[in-house]
Image: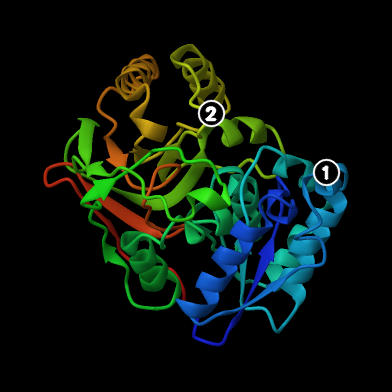
């Protein structure tokens, strides 16, 4: 069900617990307030959401319990991730997938939240690859209008999502998360639009993917999915893996079956645009080795670690027309 004003959204810290650290609690409060004032939601923390990075690093079971409790609580309509990290993989032994399947909810997050998205995909529950509390909702000055638009369009409406045009401008500029920077604006540059690396015609399939480095962690785990038939979307994190690391990760993912039977690839612009040409060349060579020299690949899409971002519904049918460079989601994100 789509969200409405007055609905309750729970916040969770499933990976890094920085939202509860003394030096970042102010930023969490900014993001929470915007969800309440801008979107009209009632925001509630789970018991361990704000216990801080040290405690949560030592207690993956409690992080997992927060997620399951949020899904089973009938008063909670949506679950929003505070931030990513690199530690969600440790939740897997403590997650009851059948419990998630029996209590579907909206889940929103990106980056290390890829693990949670794969849990929910296994459970047959749709989820949403998009902004987190600290990284987008608490952005300096205001939430980017482009991001706000897609949160509303995807989560607050059950209409077909339709055409997702790129933003007019983007930024990957890093500004430290300090209170002194709250009123600092980031330097924006013109967005070049979506581009096609190879292939032609129209690629169509269900959306599946996430953060490349996190997918690498998920190989051979209980949540590793069958990618066949999917429109694979991929992005890299702010750690900006060097080209040789990117190549090794892609090789491992391909060996694990990620490229088997997919309908095409959608790549987000790398963080700050770093290594974009190198990544594209590496991917093109890999696909050629795999016997997929004509598999459609689009790049420069607006999800992931740059700003602003759209919202991608996991499992929804999407289409990219290589001739017109038009990207659309051809069903609603919520029922």
Q: Position of residue 29 (x, y in %)?
A: 62, 65
Query: Dot 1 lies on which element?
Result: helix
Q: Locate residue 152 relative to residue 51 in the image: left or right.
A: left
The residue at which mark 1 appears reads as: 54
Residues packed near mark 1 inside 10 Å, few (<14), some (14 to 19) or many (20 plus): few
Image side of residue 106 versus residue 13, left or right: left
Query: Which label sits in the foreground, 1 or 2?
Result: 1
Q: Which residue is mark 2?
A: 239
- Looking at the image, residue 152 lies above or below residue 126: below
Q: Is residue 294 above or below residue 155?
A: above
Q: Earlier in the sequence, mark 1 or mark 2?
A: 1
Residue at the extreme bottom: 6
Name the residue rendered at 57%, 59% in the picture: 133
Q: Alpha-carbon distance for marks 1 and 2? A: 21 Å
The local secondary structure at tag 2 comes to: loop
Q: Residues within 10 Å of mark 2 (few under 14, many from 20)?
A: few
Whether residue 233 is visible here, answered yes or no, is yes
Residue furthest front in the image: 180
In the image, 323 versus 147, the foreground residue is 147
Residue 168: x and y in percent read: 20, 51
Can residue 314 be spotted in the picture?
no
Residue 263 at x, y percent in the picture: 35, 41
């Amino acid at each position: 069900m789509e969200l409405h004003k007055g609905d309750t959204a729970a916040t969770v810290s499933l990976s890094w617990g920085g939202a509860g650290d003394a030096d970042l609690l102010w930023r969490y409060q900014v993001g929470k307030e915007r969800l309440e004032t801008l979107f009209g939601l009632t925001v509630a923390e789970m018991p361990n959401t704000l216990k801080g990075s040290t405690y949560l690093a030592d207690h993956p079971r409690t992080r997992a319990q927060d997620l399951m409790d949020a899904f089973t609580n009938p008063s909670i309509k949506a679950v929003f991730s505070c931030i990513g990290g690199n530690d969600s993989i440790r939740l897997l032994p403590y997650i009851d997938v059948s419990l998630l399947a029996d209590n579907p909810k909206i889940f929103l997050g990106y980056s290390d939240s890829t693990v949670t998205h794969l849990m929910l995909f296994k459970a047959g529950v749709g989820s949403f690859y998009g902004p987190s509390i600290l990284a987008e909702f608490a952005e300096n000055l205001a939430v980017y209008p482009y991001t706000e638009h897609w949160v509303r369009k995807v989560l607050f409406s059950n209409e077909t999502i339709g055409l997702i045009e790129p933003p007019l401008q983007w930024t990957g500029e890093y500004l430290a998360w300090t209170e002194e920077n709250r009123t600092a604006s980031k330097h924006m540059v013109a967005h070049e639009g979506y581009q096609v690396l190879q292939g032609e015609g129209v690629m169509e399939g269900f959306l599946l993917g996430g953060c490349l480095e996190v997918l690498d962690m998920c190989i051979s785990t209980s949540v590793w999915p069958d990618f066949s038939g999917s429109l694979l979307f991929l992005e890299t994190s702010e750690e900006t893996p060097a080209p040789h690391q990117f190549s090794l990760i892609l090789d491992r993912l391909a060996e694990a079956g990620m490229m088997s039977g997919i309908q095409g690839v959608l790549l987000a612009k790398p963080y700050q645009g770093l290594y974009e040409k190198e990544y594209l060349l590496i991917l093109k060579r890999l696909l050629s080795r795999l016997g997929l020299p004509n598999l459609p690949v689009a790049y420069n899409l607006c999800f992931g670690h740059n700003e602003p971002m759209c919202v991608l519904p996991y499992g929804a049918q999407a289409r990219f027309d290589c001739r017109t460079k038009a990207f659309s989601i051809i069903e609603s994100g919520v029922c």
